[in-house]
């Protein structure tokens, strides 16, 4: 995308669109707040065009899919004033209180955008694969390591042989010992991190299922994954630190955890209660 907003880009390209595409463009320009919650069929009906025209419109303005169009519009509509996660922040007049409000809004917006990027079928498939796995490994480096550890802890509580690491050498050894029924979950905001991509290649060569938690943008990790749990593109690569993207990763981890728990039997509830009772004993 260029520095122009998506709506500005549509206005600039409108004259070069076909008549059918112009109908779609006009509806998007007039009602941009409705687009993120619509399907291609609904937009086609409202714009008095065909679903094929909606898809062609997206490609004509340089967006690969209608899903990405919705994400970009949602992102632009929910952006707070200024970017809180780049180096320009050092020159701002923000107080701790104002930054708290901005961070809260930024994180909330990112999680809400995930409603448009996460594919339901991919999510269901990920849960099914993880339920059948003997070993589930999580790998992430930098800011992506925190959700990996959170995932390992949660699944360990459910009785899974789960492990997490930010050490490439450790994870290569772990993947070597994994079977085809096992699962490797790779977490990367950009989907371009060298160690993550190399590990995906290695896991694929050993026929281990690769689940990627990464941004819905073309990347080596997305191409290599068997299952993709996609997050919105909410942060640039050149940033102060991982903020909103980490929240989207944790949100997906929580969803996986609850989805797996829901499909387990009463025995796990009994075990969780036993664990809780032991912890309460330590508090006395």
Image: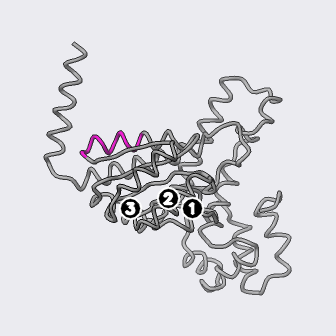
In x, y percent, where is residue 224? 53, 67
Determine if the magenta segment contains residue 129.
no
The reply to whether the C-beta atoms of the residues labelled 1 and 2 are less than 8 Å apart is yes
Task: Write down the region rendered in magenta.
Answer: 150-159
- For marks 3 and 2, give the CA distance: 10 Å
Dot 3 or dot 1: first in sequence order is: 3
Q: Relative to residue 209, is residue 279 depicted above or below?
A: above
Tell which residue pokes out farthest to the top in this image: 284
Q: Main secondary structure of the magenta part?
A: helix
Q: Relative to residue 16, is residue 7 depicted above or below?
A: above
Q: Nearer the viewer, mark 3 or mark 1?
A: 1
Would residue 185 appear left or right of 23 to someone viewing this image? left
Q: Quadrant of residue 198?
A: bottom right
At x 50% / y 65%, what residue is drawn? 225
In x, y percent, where is residue 15? 86, 79
- What number of labels is visible? 3
Residue 126: which numbered mark, if any? 3
Residue under numbered circle 2: 212
Q: How is the image coloured?
A: one colour
């Amino acid at each position: 995308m260029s520095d122009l907003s998506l709506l500005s880009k549509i206005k600039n390209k409108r004259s070069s669109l076909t008549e059918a595409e112009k109908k779609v463009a006009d509806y998007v320009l007039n009602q941009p707040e409705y687009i993120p919650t619509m399907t291609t069929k609904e937009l086609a009906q409202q714009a008095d065009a065909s679903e094929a025209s909606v898809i062609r419109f997206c490609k004509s303005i340089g967006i690969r899919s209608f899903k990405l169009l919705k994400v970009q519009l949602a992102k632009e509509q929910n952006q707070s004033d200024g970017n809180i996660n780049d180096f320009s922040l050092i020159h701002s007049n923000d107080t701790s209180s104002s930054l708290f409000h901005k961070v809260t809004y930024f994180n909330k917006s990112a999680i809400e955008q995930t409603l448009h990027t996460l594919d339901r079928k991919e999510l269901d498939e990920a849960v099914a694969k993880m339920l059948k796995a003997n070993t589930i490994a999580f790998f992430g480096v930098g800011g992506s390591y925190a959700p990996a550890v959170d995932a390992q802890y949660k699944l360990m509580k459910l009785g899974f042989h789960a492990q997490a690491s930010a050490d490439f050498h450790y994870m290569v050894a772990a993947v070597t010992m994994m079977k085809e029924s096992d699962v490797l979950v790779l977490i990367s905001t950009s989907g371009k991190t060298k160690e993550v991509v190399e590990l995906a290649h290695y896991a694929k060569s050993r026929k281990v299922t690769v689940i990627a938690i990464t941004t819905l943008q073309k990347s080596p990790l997305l191409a290599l994954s068997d299952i993709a749990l996609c997050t919105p593109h909410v942060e640039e690569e050149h940033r102060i630190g991982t903020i909103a993207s980490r929240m989207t990763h944790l949100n997906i981890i929580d969803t996986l955890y609850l989805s797996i728990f829901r499909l387990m039997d009463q025995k796990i509830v009994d075990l969780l209660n036993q664990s809780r009772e032991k912890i309460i004993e330590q508090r006395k």
